[in-house]
Amino acid sequence: MRFFVALLGLAVCAPALSQSFPNKPITTVVGFEPGGGTDTVARIIGKTLGEQTGQQVVVENKSGAGGTIAVDYVSRSAPDGYTIVLANVGAMAANPHMMNLQYNPLTDLAPVTMATVFANVLVVQPALKIKSLKEYLDLARKDPDKITYASSGVGGAAHLAGELLALQAKVKLVHVPYKGGGPAAKGFLGKEVDSFIATPVSVHKQVEAGRAVAIATTGPKRAALMPNVPTVAEQGFPGFEALNWYAYYAPKGTPKEIIDVLNREIVKALKDKSTIGLLDKQGVEAEPGTPEALAQYTKREYETWGKVIKDVGIKAQ
């Protein structure tokens, strides 16, 4: 009898729970400094989300360790839907293979929805006088351990893209990690490195000005900001894909009814025309989806990059 009453109580509470949520501000935790890509995306989406729900969406920056500090914090937060994280590929699929973390990305968080995806672009110094990925790789084969590429840091999407390319092309590329995209761009423009794997939005002006030559993008399709630049896949490596992505997760144990509300509202915000326009200006593409699809994608990325990290022997710095 008690069991029946308990079940009845749950059945009554579930609709009430979803109908009353949210009734106070929601905090989106971001693992990077204000003004960065993840932070900017969180604020764009958060503004629309707040307007839809009638509740303020606060962005809280907990930077450090490639975004893992923020994910760890949310994994230990109350599972009530009021604290969520906008996490990236590094914190969810790469760093867990390089660091001794307190959370398991596949079991300690509840997927809500993918938010945005975007490819990187490989740019080279004009002085190299090359125009294609083939010429770039030929240089690397001709002079092993000489061709350098900059990235925003160890284990980030750009670094992973470079290592995956080197593995598939069977060449040696020398990775030069910087502490962020800004310092990496400065290093490239200062001719400290031969090439740079960057976000299109951060280098397209340099490409237009002739200070960099774009030879390949890393996604499954051409980047919207650089439609004339072929993908790595188009240039002899079918299936090559190394995307940046940001996705929303809640703490493990968050009721399904709350996850459903968060998914519905965030997906609605991602489909909003003004939100899409602002995201487009950042060079990122809205990619709303289901919690189930995000769970599957996270697992696939975790396995893919775990293998690359193991094969290459990447270590956290």
Image (cartoon, grey):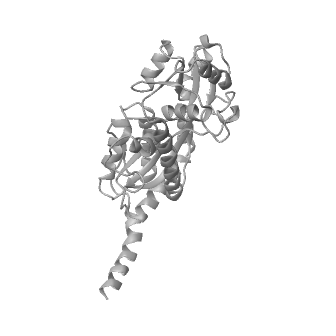
Depicted 297 relative to depicted 193: above or below: below
Residue 158 appears left or right of 57: right
Instruction: Write the residue at 45% across / 55% down.
Output: 111
Quadrant in which the N terminus is drawn: bottom left
Instruction: Judge whether residue 210 can be spotted in this image.
Output: no
Which of 311 and 208 lies nearest the eye of the viewer? 311
Depicted 16 relative to depicted 187: above or below: below
Residue 53: x percent and y percent? 43, 53
Which of 27 and 108 lies nearest the eye of the viewer? 108
Residue 14, by quadrant, is bottom left
How many marks on residues? 0
Residue 151: x percent and y percent? 47, 27
Which of 227 and 265 lies nearest the eye of the viewer? 227
Residue 276: x percent and y percent? 56, 41
Residue 290: x percent and y percent? 53, 56
Instruction: Write the residue at 35% across / 85% down.
Output: 4
Residue 8 appears left or right of 297: left
Which of 315 and 12 lies nearest the eye of the viewer? 315
- The residue sitting at the bottom extreme is 1
Instruction: Write the residue at 36% across / 46% down.
Output: 71
Depicted 81 relative to depicted 143: above or below: below
Depicted 145 relative to depicted 258: above or below: above
Quadrant in which the C terminus is drawn: top left
Instruction: Judge whether residue 294 can be spotted in this image.
Output: yes
